[in-house]
Image (tube, helix red, strand yellow):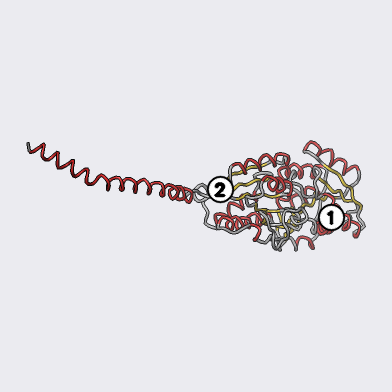
Amino acid sequence: MNAIFDFGLWIIDWRRHRRNAKKFLLLIFALAILAAPVAAEAQQAGRIPRIGVLGNSPSPPWEALRRGLRDLGYVESQTIAIEWRFTQGKVERAPALAEELVRLKVDVIVTSSMPVIRAVKQATGTIPIVMAGSFDPVGAGLVTSLARPGGNVTGLAEMATELVGKRVELLREAVPGVSRLAVLLGPPAPADPLFLREAEVAARALHIELQVLRARDPGEFDSTFAAMTRERASAVLVLQHPAFFPRRTLLAEFAVKHRLPTMHAFREFVEAGMLMSYGANLEAMFQRAAFYVDRILKGARPGDLPVEQPTKFELVVNLKTAKALGLTIPQSVLIRADQVIQ
């Protein structure tokens, strides 16, 4: 009898609170809906930034980018992720690799050399692009101006053409008696006419005759250097080209084989065995690119970050190569060298 009485009270109590129970369940359901985007936002906030890197080869300058990011407090695979892609000297691969990085939805893309930068720019007009080194980005239409780039591209630009004449002068000073200078071009590139024009102006002022040759692939290196020797070239100005960087050691070997002193823009070519270089420090530029990555990840718009140009240029001489060529580098050149490789 008592059990029946207790059951009756429970039914009355349930009916009394049923309406409140419904309100409570509706409240729980509403809170769950509101919490969903908050949870998703929290999950998104916990995602580490992803940097896309697209270069010609995994060469030393890219390690400088890593170093720059570490100096700014980033830890790879912990606070930042890097997607590495390289053309391995085959610039025709750049468009496909650029599109791959875009599909990965990276937060920023770091790249260098004009053909590769162009490929990335064509692949995306929204993902920020940082140039670790470029040639005339204004003339190429990548930025509106160096001070106010606009768009999604910024970074660093080297003074590529302005230094060609200086390289001719330094090579003439290091190798007295140069009357015929070979100029080596890579596969056809938009910058070729500008580089050649500067070389011609300097050569004319020094009464040097130019011999222009092109090597489209490594299979042509030996025959191209042999042609220089046949035409009695006294030295070689190797012009900048992304296809040359991963093959710089091979180029240096053929130059020594044919006993031809060489000049390039970057120290990496001298470290690989060429005689001289004069230009910006690539590693310093790539390390500086980390600054742009940091600013962009913290909310800056690439179009508002001025494009920087190097203010310091270095002269590097390889005395080991000079000895192999039977050359004595004048003291006037050595005392100005920023580095002399023994």
Location of residue 204 by image quarter: bottom right
Q: In percent of the image, x 68 and y 41: which residue is there?
A: 87
75 or 224: nearer the viewer:
75
The crowd level at tag 1 (other Cα within 10 Å; few <14, some 14-19, many 20+) is some
Question: Which residue was labeled with disc 1?
Answer: 175
Q: Is residue 200 left or right of residue 131?
A: right
Q: Secondary structure at mark 1?
A: loop
**Distance from the alpha carbon under mark 2 to that under mark 1:** 48 Å
Question: Residue 115: x and y, percent?
Answer: 74, 46
Question: Residue 44: x and y, percent?
Answer: 48, 48
Q: Residue furthest left?
A: 1
Q: In percent of the image, x 56 and y 48: which residue is there?
A: 50
Disc assigned to residue 50: 2
**Residue 236 higher or lower than 331, as above or below:** above
Q: Which circle's residue, 2 or 1, is located before the other in the chain?
A: 2
Disc 2 versus disc 1: nearer the observer: 2
The crowd level at tag 2 (other Cα within 10 Å; few <14, some 14-19, many 20+) is many
